[in-house]
Image (tube, helix red, strand yellow):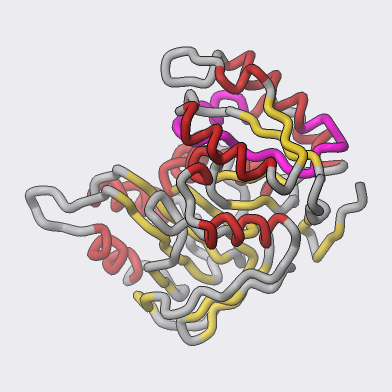
Amino acid sequence: MQASTCGEVVFPPRLRPGDRVAIVAPSGALPRGRFLSGVAWLRERYRVELAAEVFARKGYFAGDDAERLASLSARMRDPGIRAIIAGRGGYGATRIVSSLPWGEWAKAPSWLVGFSDVTALHLEAHARGVASLHAPNVTGLGGARACDRLRLMRALEGRLLAPWESLTSVRTGDATGRLVGGNLALIYAQAASGKLTNCNGAILVLEDVTEKPYQVDRMLHALLEAGMFACSAGIVFGEFAHCEAGPDGVTVSEVIGDFATRVSCPVYSGAPFGHGERNEPLILGSVANIVNGTMYFPRA
């Protein structure tokens, strides 16, 4: 498996039709119907390997920690697997992330694909200097539009992604940097455990779901105090789904507006990724450019 490099980031090989793709469940238990619909679509183009343990269940986990760890570890150690796609998010990846075989995987990496709780895996891949794909989980693909599925396929197969136009400027300016981030709550949790690596010079991409505006404020403030944004090239907020204002009337948009006054880099919101209807893929680790409110995605 030959990986290409750009600077300090390694990009796993691009997929081709018929390549082996493994589906894992490192976090929450899977909703069978929508999950199998997503699997069926992937099987139209790739050789999908679906282990029986993905349907395991223990409380809100897809099996206990040992089961989830063994399942994901086996796929990370398999050099013939080109992509490892999470079945869903939920919670559980942070409980096993430190025990995964990252050193072996980084020598011949496959694409790690997913979002939400999968952010824990993305951050570890970033720490190892390997690109990964922030994109819908398999369950999300089950109800996705044809255009959204096509975007995922294009990202996996190394084709240029369409730019994101008309982002909302919260703090104006252009920016260039490697993409780092994902789910805000997971980034906050990993920072609390000391596992968030240096993000200097990066464009940070952030989204979340079912958090109250004051909780979003608290997480952003804590990360700001920890110095995470001190040397950021830019910050781009995606969707904050089901994060409605409480009785005080304060919205997430107002929280982001206040936050933007306390950082020195460009800040944009309204990007089409997250837990809402739009969740377009992002190659974390690749270099992106923001020019006049449009975000461009060269591959490296």
Compared to residue 78, the image places residue 247 above or below, namely: below
In this rendering, the count of numbered labels is: 0
For image coordinates 26% across by 64% down, the residue present is 253
**Relative side of 24 to 16, left or right:** left
Q: Is residue 288 visible?
A: no
Name the quadrant containing residue 54: top right
For image coordinates 65% across by 18% down, the residue present is 52
Name the quadrant containing residue 180: bottom right
Compared to residue 274, the image places residue 137 above or below, namely: above
**Relative side of 248 to 149, left or right:** left
The one nearer the camera, 224 or 177, is 177
For image coordinates 44% across by 53% down, the residue present is 274
Q: Give the range drawn in magenta.
A: 76-97
The one nearer the camera, 259 or 136, is 136
Q: Position of residue 281 (x, y in %)?
A: 57, 58
Compared to residue 194, the image places residue 152 above or below, namely: below
Q: Position of residue 48 (x, y in %)?
A: 72, 36
**Relative side of 55 to 80, left or right:** left
